[in-house]
Amino acid sequence: MGAMRRAVSAILLSAGIVLFAADAVTCAFPFTTVYITRPGRFYHRRGCLVIRNGRPIAISVSNAREQGFYPCLKCDPPTW
């Protein structure tokens, strides 16, 4: 994965785009899987105690954020 990050950074820098490290990670890994429940307002890591007894639905971080979900405060899933 480190090679991918370096490649993305090199491409962006050659185009004159300077990003902070968190922004570069967002570009490279927007499809990390998290889990949501219906009805719910938060997305979670796999195995989070909050969704342990529910029926979690797998979704990408970017889709979860687009749909208005927030990161769980207990399991601290990725926010990018």
Image: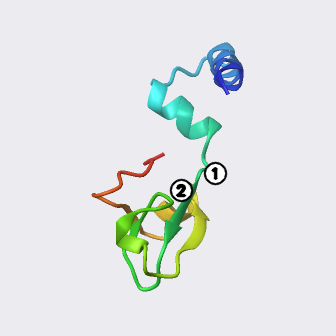
Q: Position of residue 37 (x, y in %)?
A: 47, 78
Up the image or down, 4 lies above or below 51; here it is above
User: Counting residues from the N terminus, which is met first, the one under dot 2 or under dot 1?
Assistant: 1
Q: SS class of the residue under badge 2?
A: helix
Q: Position of residue 40 (x, y in %)?
A: 39, 79
Up the image or down, 58 lies above or below 8; here it is below
Q: Is 61 placed left or right of 6 in the picture? A: left
Q: Residue at 45%, 47% (x, y): give it.
A: 78
Specify the amino acid type for callout 1.
Answer: Phe
* Residues marked 2 and 1 touching at CB (< 8 Å): yes
Q: Position of residue 12 (x, y in %)?
A: 64, 22
Which one is in front, 6 or 75? 75
Q: Residues within 10 Å of mark 2 (few under 14, many from 20)?
A: many
Q: Residue at 52%, 66% (x, y): give it.
A: 35
Q: Quadrant of residue 44?
A: bottom left
Q: Residue at 48%, 45% (x, y): give it.
A: 80
Disc 2 versus disc 1: distance between alpha carbons?
Answer: 6 Å
The image's colouring method is rainbow
Specify the amino acid type for callout 2.
Answer: Val
Up the image or down, 4 lies above or below 34; here it is above
Q: SS class of the residue under badge 1?
A: loop
- The residue to which callout 1 is attached is 31
Q: How many marks?
A: 2
Q: Quadrant of residue 28?
A: top right
Q: Position of residue 4 (x, y in %)?
A: 71, 25
Q: Residue at 66%, 17% (x, y): give it.
A: 6
- The residue to which callout 2 is attached is 61
Which one is in front, 39 or 27? 39
